[in-house]
Image: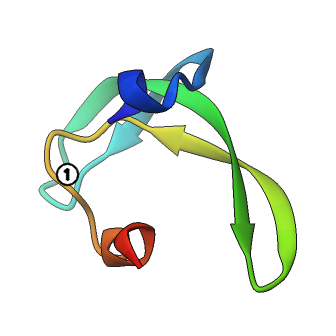
């Protein structure tokens, strides 16, 4: 998905999972329109879609 959207890579970030394990993941910048406004947001890589991804498909 990140590749198909051609997101700009910002670097890597350490994240802590619900299990307590930490991982380094890629961090990207995306522009998103929501509620009549356009915002720049940071996106981190995930192996599986996370809660809230259904908004992208609407």
> Please, which colouring scheme is shown?
rainbow
Look at the image and tell me in which quarter the C terminus lies: bottom left
Q: Nearer the viewer, residue 18 or 26?
A: 26
x, y (%) of residue 44? 45, 38
User: Which residue is disc 1 drawn over?
Assistant: 20
Looking at the image, is 54 positioned above or below residue 26? below
x, y (%) of residue 29? 66, 33
Looking at the image, is 57 positioned above or below residue 40? below
User: Tag 1: Cα neighbours inside 10 Å, few (<14), some, or many (≥20)?
Assistant: few
x, y (%) of residue 16? 33, 46
Q: Nearer the viewer, residue 35 or 15?
A: 35
Looking at the image, is 13 positioned above or below residue 49? above
Q: Nearer the viewer, residue 53 or 42?
A: 53
- Residue beneath the point at 53% across and 28% down: 27
Look at the image and tell me in which quarter the N terminus lies: top left
For this view, does 16 lie left or right of residue 19?
right
Looking at the image, is 36 positioned above or below residue 48? below
């Amino acid at each position: 998905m990140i590749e198909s959207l051609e997101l700009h890579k910002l670097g890597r970030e350490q994240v802590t999972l619900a299990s307590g394990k930490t991982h380094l993941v890629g961090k990207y910048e995306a522009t998103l329109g929501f509620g009549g406004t356009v915002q720049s947001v940071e996106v981190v890589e995930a192996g599986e879609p996370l809660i809230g991804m259904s908004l992208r498909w609407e």
